Image: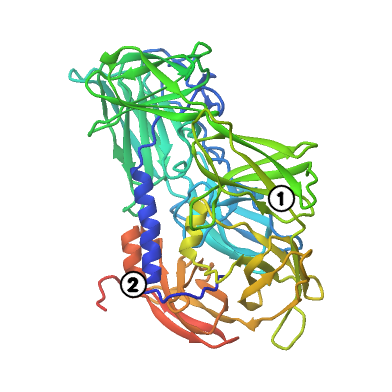
Amino acid sequence: MRSSRGKSTTNTPILAGLFALVLVVVAGAVWLLGDDTAVESTGRVVQVEDDAQEAPMTVPEGTAPEAPEPIAVPVALRSEPATEVFQPAAGTPCRALSGRVVDEQGTGVGNAELRMYKGNPLLLDVNFAGTRKLLDVAAVSAADGSFTFPCVPVGRDYVLVGEHPDFARTELAGLVVQPNRDLVDVTLRMEQGATVAGVVRTSGGGVPIAAARVELYDAIASVQLEPEERRPWKIVFTDNTGAYAFEHVSATSLKVRVLAEGYESQVRMLSFALDARASDRTVDFELKIGTSIPGVVVDTQGRPIEGVHVEATSLTKDYVGTATAYSDRRGEFILDGMGDEHFYQVRATRKGFSNKVLPKVHVDNGQIQIEMDQRLYVEGVVLDISDRPIRNYSLTLMRAAEGRDPLFLNDTRNFSASDGTFVFDNLDPGSYALEARAAGLAPSWSENFAVVRTDDPAPRVTIVMGRGGTLSGAIEDPTGKPVPNAVVKLNPNNHVDSPIQGIFSLLGNTTQRKVQTRTDGRGEFELANVRPGTYQLGVSHPEFAPTTVNDVLILDDDVGSNPPVTVSMRLGATIAGVALDANGRPITFCEVQITNKKTAYLDAATTDAQGRFEFHNLEEGTYTLMVKPDRIGSQAVGPLQKLMYAQRSQQEQFVSGGQQLTDVELYLPNLTEQN
């Protein structure tokens, strides 16, 4: 999948596993507070509106206020954060993917909702927003649990996700769809999941609190979202004994939040990151009498600001208190559910204004005033090399720093102006640059500029765009025959395709933008409107090992022509085989990891229904393979135990260029065996 040239790496698979585990633990430890949620009472179902503010406490109609029954928000797959849709390359073939959804006893489960995602092979167990792309296919299992996706694009690292109201959300990651056969006999085994339950009482006296609203959040899925973007996974109300329960819980990092009118709100965190699966937990709450803090939000001129999201977070040890509110047209807000025994940090956010934090607020302070600074802007113009204005273009914001290329931020905007001018606003103070893109022209960067709070005029930048350079060439196989449909892309010169760096690029900003194309039927390609510079040319194809060429100089077409490049691809090797348990039985749908210490190559895949695995397009070298099972028989395997299995199942295999090694038997020993 990936070919990398770089420093030798030791214990790479174990480090990658520990890295993913640390991500889960760290994300689970983040206090995700100040959520913007709203409930609309509709009888038996609580609807969570994405763009609404938090509503006053309400009890579903038809239920006595003193004894409301728990009511859950339907999960389906709509509870997930917005996910980018995966768009396969034009002409990508597809194959069928079929199997069964079963329960823990192997009985078929009908009417399960099934979706497919494009995942990351090194984050098989982590569902961060942005690390997966939704495939535009869906299915529902039949009465016997059978299902079929008729056309899944050929590819790998797919994640099958199933949901059913009687079971926990279930995933099967690392699926590979090959061009020469359908993927059949896929088994998605759904479990009952855990129950998170407890009682909400008053502090000290222990009197049950009925009609308390209890919210459950999947902390991992929403860790990258802003506080005002997070939504509860489920909502229930306590009954007349103060009891609540969430069933069919599968998430490994949870936040439970309780709100009750007249009481201090509380939040507790739960983590199963080191466990084999989520387990039943009892989480009781004792709520103290709550109070309110009124406040007002104004700008630096004293004018009220409407629509500011205000959240207060207590700095207590045993639990966290939290309250949220929005300012009205007079800038006023009320934070309910506050405690009077500790201090709070208050944070105000609104588009167009810089975030403002009051680090230490107490209810005895009375009304608080939050003064917010308007965000700043830069203005400028986009011209061609003849100083003519460019009418239609897009600008992407970049974070600038001395001594390195700027980092692309997730902020791209389209502009249209006859004179080429623009105003790019909503900026906090800092150092920035802008990249301009327009049809028929090369991407162009502005000079770095600083945005500061001053009485001086806003900075003004000029971006000059030219045609850029054109690189053409041909891709050949080792015999000189053309290679159609090969992916040709430009990377920074001497780029090392590190999988760990790839994970970080998914989770944060990057210095790179994708520039790639595919070869035509004659094996030829052309990359036009390229920003002049020195690049690495990378080529990949399903039948060959990845190939890179460094020091490819691309000049502006107005300066000189760029000679065509011919790249000869090498035959890739294959390592394939079967994963077996200690009794010699195939291990189905189990993760197998492969690494090459010399090249820092690292990849993972999932065995099929016969326990087979395959890794293609490998460079010549020595590879280490290992098994990382999710379960042994009927027993689930936890993350640390999985790493121990991986260490003891290691096996080294050498392959030469083009070798097809297809009979590897990878054994998973008993943990009681000694090395």
In the rendered view, would you say 589 is above or below 168? Answer: below
Q: Are marks 2 and 1 in contact (CB under 8 Å)?
A: no
Report the side of 524 relative to 515 (left or right): right
**What residue sits 53% from the left and 30% below the top?**
375
Residue 438, given in percent of the width and then of the height, sits at 75, 49
Q: For residue 561, what is the image quadrant?
A: bottom right
Quadrant placement of the N terminus: bottom right
Residue 432, given in percent of the width and then of the height, sits at 54, 45
Crowding at dot 1, Cα within 10 Å, few <14 / some 14-19 / many 20+, comes out as many
Q: What numbered label is drawn on residue 647?
A: 2
Q: Amino acid under label 1?
A: Val
C-alpha distance separating marks 2 and 1: 55 Å
Residue 117, given in percent of the width and then of the height, sits at 58, 53
Q: Amino acid under label 2?
A: Gln
Q: What numbered label is drawn on residue 547?
A: none
**Circle 2 or circle 1, nearest the eye:** 1
Secondary element at tag 2: helix
Q: Which residue lies furthest to the left in this view?
A: 204
Q: What numbered label is drawn on residue 464?
A: 1
In the rendered view, would you say 275 is above or below 674? Answer: above
Report the side of 128 relative to 418 (left or right): left
As rendered, which of 190 and 660 lies closer to the eye? Answer: 660
